[in-house]
Image (spheres, grey):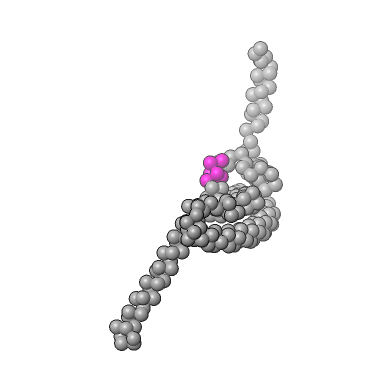
Amino acid sequence: MSASPARLDANRANAEKSTGPRTAEGKQRSALNALRHGLTSKTVILPGEDLETYQKFRDNFFADLNPKGELEQQLAFTLVNTQWRANRCRAFEQSLLAGDGSPRDQVESLSKLSLYESRLTRIFQTTLKQFLSLQAERLEREEFDMKNAVQVLRNCQLKQIPFQPSEYGFVFSVDQVQARLHRHIRIHEAHQADMINFNRRLCTRGSC
């Protein structure tokens, strides 16, 4: 059923009224509304923000942080989203400074923006401290377990019996433990070679 001419006229009139603010004062109010919405929104991605850009931002953060386990990943997400909002604050700041609003409105808005950005900074720093502490504890446990796994592997090799890490309570794969053992052997050989070369130089100088 098609709309009546009266309804079409009403729709056109409403559309003309909804074209957005036209005066400098109206545009400033609109910018302030966008600012308030952007700062208080529980949604990470706001309308007008690019999802692909956010995803790339998140992936780069995760690549740097390398979180493992549910808790580390949750803290990493908090860091990503907090920094994303902090970057949005800077974008809002540039928008306000480039606007045509009154200096009084700009000062008030920039003051609120600064307070919000300071809160985000505190959240980021606190979360990062928690994340790094948790990650350090995990890495320490993993290093301790890896050293024990290498010792068990060497013992299995001496006895010529199969080595399966899971049978000894390790979460590493056979390849991971073997790679660490090979690394340890290569480092030991390099140290031995350096010591031999050092002794040769001493003999060459007549110190033997």
99 relative to 175 in the view: left or right: right
- Provide the residue span drawn in magenta: 51-56
Quarter of the image with the N terminus is top right
Q: Is residue 53 highlighted in magenta? A: yes
Visible residue check, residue 29: no
- Write down the quadrant of residue 18 in the picture: top right
Q: Is residue 77 above or below residue 154?
A: above
**Picture residue at 51% right of the left edge, 61% below the top:** 155
Q: Is residue 202 highlighted in magenta? A: no
Quarter of the image with the C terminus is bottom left
Q: Residue furthest left?
A: 204
**Picture residue at 68% right of the left edge, 54% below the top:** 116
**Picture residue at 63% right of the left edge, 53% below the top:** 72
- Write down the quadrant of residue 118 in the picture: bottom right
Q: Is residue 186 above or below residue 206?
A: above
The image shows a total of numbered marks equal to 0
Q: Is residue 126 above or below residue 28?
A: below
17 relative to 203 in the view: left or right: right
Q: Give coordinates of residue 167: x percent, y percent.
A: 58, 51
Decide which of 23, 145 is in the foreground and name it: 145
157 relative to 206 in the view: left or right: right
Decide whether the magenta segment is chiefly helix, strand or loop: helix
Q: Give coordinates of residue 120: x percent, y percent.
A: 66, 55
Decide which of 66, 185 is in the foreground and name it: 185
Decide which of 56, 184 is in the foreground and name it: 184
**Picture residue at 32% right of the left edge, 83% below the top:** 203
Q: Give coordinates of residue 147: x percent, y percent.
A: 54, 62
Visible residue check, residue 156: yes
